[in-house]
């Protein structure tokens, strides 16, 4: 959020440029942009810092979403945080992390490369607003992970690919992380100690 609107839009343009360039590589089948902040999620640098990876295959998690034809939640109800000119922000239902936010276009857009300049501008303003609210959620900076889900290079094989951004944090309260129990790891079924609707309500009040 500290980059301001113009700065964030420049970053989005850079993400799109790097996505397109990495797809030209022989092993650039799937490009993922991600950002980390905070020691509690393993970041060794205090400020937010991002990276871009290219994979020679579609990793399991995004592949599962692509096969299921994931799309933006059309009726998040009390999990809705805000809407902004064709973009919707909401807390995920049945989330693993206490803070689990999804940013997605209301109408399908496959990836950063095919996104119009107008949509990039709205996405930039949405990100500025969301991160400004996240800064105020607790009384100290929120550690988080953010990543972008987008179509693979061979997008024709995934005609329903729907661009979206996920932002998650392990914090359930200021400085208090949510710990994952053995039974959750063993079964793949997770018990979120925080109601997503409560997080959404707090963030709505801050935007």
Image (tube, rainbow, N blue to C red):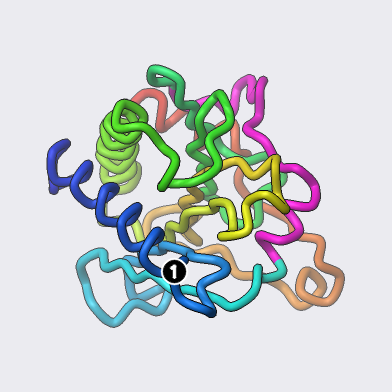
| Relative side of 205 to 63, left or right | left
Most foreground residue, 86 or 207: 86
- Residue at the image position 76 percent from the left and 78 percent from the top: 182
Q: Residues within 10 Å of mark 1 (few under 14, many from 20)?
A: few
- Residue at the image position 81 percent from the left and 61 percent from the top: 189
- Residue at the image position 41 percent from the left and 37 percent from the top: 115
Most foreground residue, 58 or 22: 22
Secondary structure type for disc 1: loop
- Residue at the image position 54 percent from the left and 53 percent from the top: 149
Mark 1 sits on what residue?
24
Q: Is residue 111 above or below residue 190?
A: above
Give the quadrant of residue 132. Answer: top left
Give the quadrant of residue 197. Answer: top right
Q: Is residue 162 above or below residue 142?
A: above
| Relative side of 162 to 200, left or right | right
| Relative side of 162 to 40, left or right | right
Q: Check the image and name the residue furthest to the right.
A: 187
User: Where is the C terminus found, in terms of image quarters?
Assistant: top left
Most foreground residue, 97 or 120: 120
Name the spot of residue 55 as percent of width and height, x first: 55, 76
Most foreground residue, 57 or 123: 57
| Relative side of 68 to 3, left or right | right
Name the spot of residue 158 as percent of width and height, x first: 70, 49
Q: Is residue 80 above or below residue 194?
A: above
- Range covered by the magenta-colored residues: 61-82
User: Where is the N terminus found, in terms of image quarters?
Assistant: top left
Name the spot of residue 134 as percent of width and height, x first: 33, 43
How many marks the image carries: the answer is 1
Name the spot of residue 27 as percent of width and height, x first: 54, 79
Give the quadrant of residue 179. Answer: bottom right
Q: Is residue 6 magenta?
A: no
């Amino acid at each position: 959020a500290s980059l301001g609107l113009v700065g964030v839009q420049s970053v989005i343009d850079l993400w799109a440029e790097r996505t397109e360039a990495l797809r030209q590589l022989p092993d650039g089948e799937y490009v993922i942009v991600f950002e980390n902040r905070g020691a509690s999620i393993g970041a060794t640098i205090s400020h937010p810092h991002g990276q871009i990876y290219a994979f020679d295959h579609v990793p399991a998690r995004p592949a599962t979403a692509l096969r299921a034809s994931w799309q933006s939640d059309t009726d998040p109800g009390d999990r809705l945080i805000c809407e902004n000119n064709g973009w919707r922000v909401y807390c995920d239902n049945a989330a693993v992390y206490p803070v689990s936010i999804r940013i997605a276009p209301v109408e399908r857009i496959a990836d950063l490369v095919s996104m119009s300049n107008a949509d990039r501008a709205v996405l930039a303003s949405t990100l500025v607003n969301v991160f400004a609210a996240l800064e105020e959620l607790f009384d100290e900076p929120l550690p988080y992970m953010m990543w972008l889900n987008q179509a693979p290079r061979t997008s024709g094989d995934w005609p329903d690919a729907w661009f979206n951004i996920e932002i998650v944090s392990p914090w359930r309260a200021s400085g208090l992380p949510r710990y994952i129990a053995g039974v959750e790891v063993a079964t793949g079924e997770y018990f979120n100690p925080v109601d997503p609707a409560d997080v959404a309500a707090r963030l709505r009040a801050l935007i």
